[in-house]
Amino acid sequence: MPGYIADNLKYLRFQRTPAYSQREIARKMHISRSTYGRYERGELSPPIWFLERIAEFYGLDMQLLLWSDLRKRGITTN
């Protein structure tokens, strides 16, 4: 998986207090929890529609999601 997608997905999920569960995010994105888990672990590359939807969900530019280490940038979600 290119860039920082897997790490960023996990990072963003834990930015909320309390953190979102994988199941909650998967439901919001209309995918299975196991598929979402595979995206977070970098075992499966998410399709473009998912990347667009998750970036919109978190209020981020998709380029940041793909190519920036959000932890190092200190980016938080809305």
Image: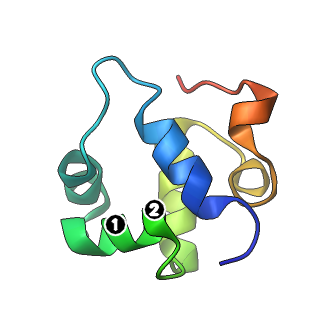
40 or 62: nearer the viewer: 40
Classify the position of the N terminus by image quarter: bottom right
Q: Is residue 2 left or right of residue 39?
A: right
**Residue 9 position in % (x across, y down):** 51, 51
The answer to whether the residues at label 2 and label 1 have Cβ atoms under 8 Å apart is: yes
Say which residue appears at 49% left-offset and 54% top-offset.
54
Q: Secondary structure at mark 2?
A: helix
Count of all numbered marks drawn on residues in the image: 2
Q: Is residue 32 visible?
A: no
- Disc sitting over residue 11 in the figure: none
Residue 42's x, y, as percent?
Answer: 53, 72
Vertical placement of residue 71 versus 48, above or below: above
The kind of secondary structure element at disc 1 is: helix
Alpha-carbon span between mark 2 and mark 1: 6 Å
Is residue 57 found left or right of 76 in the rendered image?
left
Outermost residue toward the top in this view = 17
Disc number placed over residue 40 in the picture, else none: 2
- Residue type at mark 2: give it: Glu
Residue 73: give x, y in percent of width and height.
80, 30
Three-letter amino acid code at the position of disc 1? Tyr
The circle on residue 36 is 1
Q: Residues within 10 Å of mark 1 (few under 14, many from 20)?
A: many
Check the image and tell me how it is coloured: rainbow
At a point 76% along the width and 45% down the height, the residue shown is 69
Residue at the image point whose x is 58% and y is 36% from the top: 59
Give percent across and percent down for residue 67: 81, 58
